[in-house]
Image (cartoon, helix red, strand yellow):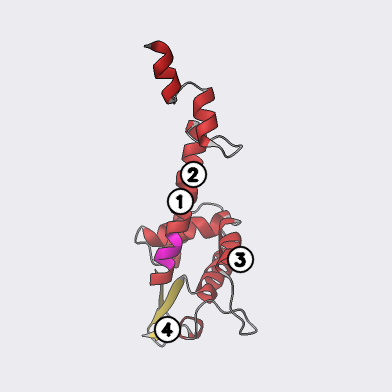
Amino acid sequence: MVQNAASVSGPRESKDGTSIPVAAMVESIIGCKWSVRLLQLCADGQTRPSAFLRACPGLSAKVMNERLRKMIRFGIVRRTVFGEKPPVEVEYLLTPFGRRFLGILDEVRRLQQAVDLGAVSEAGDPQKHAIRSGRVRGKNSAEKRG
Protein backbone atom coordinates (compact mmCIF):
# COMPACT_ATOMS: atom_id res chain seq x y z
CA MET A 1 0.00 0.00 0.00
CA VAL A 2 1.40 3.37 -1.01
CA GLN A 3 0.05 6.68 0.19
CA ASN A 4 0.23 9.77 -1.94
CA ALA A 5 3.20 11.92 -0.94
CA ALA A 6 1.02 15.01 -0.68
CA SER A 7 -1.17 13.36 1.93
CA VAL A 8 1.81 12.25 4.02
CA SER A 9 3.42 15.68 4.12
CA GLY A 10 1.79 18.46 6.08
CA PRO A 11 -1.81 19.00 5.02
CA ARG A 12 -3.17 22.37 4.02
CA GLU A 13 0.01 23.61 2.37
CA SER A 14 0.23 25.37 -0.95
CA LYS A 15 2.74 24.32 -3.60
CA ASP A 16 5.27 26.83 -2.24
CA GLY A 17 4.98 25.38 1.28
CA THR A 18 2.93 28.18 2.85
CA SER A 19 -0.16 27.42 4.90
CA ILE A 20 -3.53 27.67 3.13
CA PRO A 21 -6.21 29.52 5.16
CA VAL A 22 -9.38 27.52 5.79
CA ALA A 23 -11.45 30.37 4.34
CA ALA A 24 -9.59 29.98 1.03
CA MET A 25 -10.27 26.23 1.12
CA VAL A 26 -13.98 26.81 1.73
CA GLU A 27 -14.15 29.27 -1.17
CA SER A 28 -12.29 26.91 -3.47
CA ILE A 29 -14.37 23.84 -2.59
CA ILE A 30 -17.80 25.47 -2.37
CA GLY A 31 -17.13 27.39 -5.57
CA CYS A 32 -16.93 24.11 -7.49
CA LYS A 33 -19.99 21.90 -7.82
CA TRP A 34 -17.86 18.83 -8.54
CA SER A 35 -15.73 19.26 -5.42
CA VAL A 36 -18.81 19.42 -3.22
CA ARG A 37 -20.30 16.36 -4.93
CA LEU A 38 -17.04 14.37 -4.62
CA LEU A 39 -16.82 15.21 -0.93
CA GLN A 40 -20.40 14.07 -0.41
CA LEU A 41 -19.67 10.80 -2.19
CA CYS A 42 -16.62 10.24 0.04
CA ALA A 43 -18.77 10.93 3.10
CA ASP A 44 -21.33 8.40 1.82
CA GLY A 45 -18.65 5.70 1.61
CA GLN A 46 -17.66 5.85 -2.07
CA THR A 47 -13.89 5.49 -2.38
CA ARG A 48 -13.08 4.51 -5.95
CA PRO A 49 -12.62 6.92 -8.89
CA SER A 50 -14.80 4.77 -11.15
CA ALA A 51 -17.67 5.03 -8.63
CA PHE A 52 -17.24 8.82 -8.56
CA LEU A 53 -17.49 9.00 -12.35
CA ARG A 54 -20.60 6.77 -12.43
CA ALA A 55 -22.29 8.89 -9.75
CA CYS A 56 -21.53 12.18 -11.51
CA PRO A 57 -22.78 12.21 -15.10
CA GLY A 58 -20.96 14.99 -16.96
CA LEU A 59 -17.84 14.85 -14.78
CA SER A 60 -14.72 14.07 -16.82
CA ALA A 61 -11.82 12.03 -15.45
CA LYS A 62 -9.53 15.04 -15.95
CA VAL A 63 -11.69 17.39 -13.86
CA MET A 64 -12.27 14.71 -11.22
CA ASN A 65 -8.52 14.17 -10.84
CA GLU A 66 -7.89 17.93 -10.61
CA ARG A 67 -10.48 18.30 -7.84
CA LEU A 68 -9.24 15.27 -5.94
CA ARG A 69 -5.63 16.51 -6.16
CA LYS A 70 -6.74 19.86 -4.75
CA MET A 71 -8.52 18.15 -1.85
CA ILE A 72 -5.42 16.01 -1.19
CA ARG A 73 -3.29 19.18 -1.10
CA PHE A 74 -5.75 20.75 1.35
CA GLY A 75 -5.60 17.65 3.55
CA ILE A 76 -9.33 16.93 3.10
CA VAL A 77 -8.93 13.52 1.46
CA ARG A 78 -6.18 10.91 1.49
CA ARG A 79 -5.20 8.91 -1.60
CA THR A 80 -4.10 5.31 -1.14
CA VAL A 81 -2.71 3.12 -3.92
CA PHE A 82 -2.90 -0.66 -3.60
CA GLY A 83 -0.52 -2.73 -5.73
CA GLU A 84 2.76 -1.90 -7.36
CA LYS A 85 2.19 -2.96 -10.95
CA PRO A 86 -0.68 -1.93 -13.17
CA PRO A 87 -3.50 -2.38 -12.74
CA VAL A 88 -3.33 -0.69 -9.36
CA GLU A 89 -6.30 0.16 -7.18
CA VAL A 90 -6.72 3.70 -5.91
CA GLU A 91 -9.08 4.86 -3.21
CA TYR A 92 -9.84 8.21 -1.66
CA LEU A 93 -10.89 8.55 1.98
CA LEU A 94 -11.84 11.55 4.06
CA THR A 95 -9.25 12.59 6.61
CA PRO A 96 -10.29 13.70 10.12
CA PHE A 97 -9.86 17.28 8.86
CA GLY A 98 -12.07 16.39 5.87
CA ARG A 99 -14.84 15.15 8.17
CA ARG A 100 -14.71 18.44 10.08
CA PHE A 101 -14.69 20.32 6.77
CA LEU A 102 -17.91 18.52 5.81
CA GLY A 103 -19.50 20.16 8.85
CA ILE A 104 -19.01 23.52 7.15
CA LEU A 105 -20.74 22.27 4.02
CA ASP A 106 -23.58 20.82 6.10
CA GLU A 107 -24.06 24.18 7.80
CA VAL A 108 -24.18 25.93 4.41
CA ARG A 109 -26.81 23.40 3.30
CA ARG A 110 -28.88 23.99 6.48
CA LEU A 111 -28.65 27.76 6.02
CA GLN A 112 -29.87 27.43 2.42
CA GLN A 113 -32.80 25.28 3.55
CA ALA A 114 -33.71 27.87 6.20
CA VAL A 115 -33.62 30.64 3.59
CA ASP A 116 -35.72 28.54 1.19
CA LEU A 117 -38.31 27.93 3.92
CA GLY A 118 -38.40 31.60 4.88
CA ALA A 119 -37.01 30.98 8.36
CA VAL A 120 -34.16 33.40 7.61
CA SER A 121 -34.66 36.49 5.55
CA GLU A 122 -32.16 37.11 2.82
CA ALA A 123 -31.49 40.48 4.46
CA GLY A 124 -30.06 38.52 7.38
CA ASP A 125 -32.44 39.43 10.22
CA PRO A 126 -34.48 36.32 11.08
CA GLN A 127 -36.42 38.01 13.90
CA LYS A 128 -37.58 40.96 11.79
CA HIS A 129 -38.62 38.61 8.96
CA ALA A 130 -40.55 36.36 11.35
CA ILE A 131 -42.34 39.34 12.93
CA ARG A 132 -43.30 40.70 9.50
CA SER A 133 -44.70 37.34 8.46
CA GLY A 134 -46.70 37.03 11.72
CA ARG A 135 -44.86 33.96 13.01
CA VAL A 136 -43.34 35.56 16.11
CA ARG A 137 -45.20 37.79 18.54
CA GLY A 138 -43.59 39.98 21.11
CA LYS A 139 -44.79 40.14 24.67
CA ASN A 140 -46.71 43.37 23.90
CA SER A 141 -48.95 41.57 21.42
CA ALA A 142 -50.17 39.20 24.14
CA GLU A 143 -50.93 42.18 26.40
CA LYS A 144 -52.95 43.88 23.66
CA ARG A 145 -55.14 40.83 23.20
CA GLY A 146 -55.87 40.25 26.87
Q: Which residue type carries mark 2?
A: Leu
Residue 9: x %, y % from top left: 49, 86
- Which of disc 3 and disc 4 is earlier in sequence? 4
Q: State whether the magenta stretch is mostly helix, strand or loop.
A: helix
Q: In the rendered structure, which amino acid carries the disc numbered 1?
A: Glu
Quote the CA–CA distance across marks 2 and 4: 36 Å
Q: Which residue is found at the position 53% from the left and 60% from the top?
A: 35
Dot placed on the residue nearer the N-terminal end, 2 or 3: 3
Secondary structure state at the residue bearing disc 2: helix
Query: What residue is disc 2 on?
Result: 111
Q: As displayed, is residue 46 above or below residue 138?
A: below
The answer for how far apart the CA atoms under marks 1 and 3 are is 17 Å
> Residue 47 colored magenta?
no
Between discs 2 and 4, the one toward the N terminus? 4
Marks 2 and 1 close (CB-CB < 8 Å):
yes
In what element is the residue under mark 3? Answer: helix
Query: Residue visible at 38% across and 60% down?
Result: 43
The answer to which of marks 1 and 3 sits earlier in the sequence is 3
What stretch of residues is rendered in magenta?
98-102
Q: Which mark is residue 3?
A: 4
Quarter of the image that includes the C terminus: top left
Which numbered disc covers residue 24?
Answer: 3
Label 1: which residue?
A: 107
Q: Pointer 4 and pointer 3: residues touching (CB < 8 Å)?
A: no
Name the spot of residue 88 as percent of width and height, x first: 41, 80
Distance between the alpha carbons at the discs numbered 2 and 1: 6 Å
Of the image marks 4 and 1, the number of the one nearer the N terminus: 4
Name the one closer to the observer, 67 or 53. 67
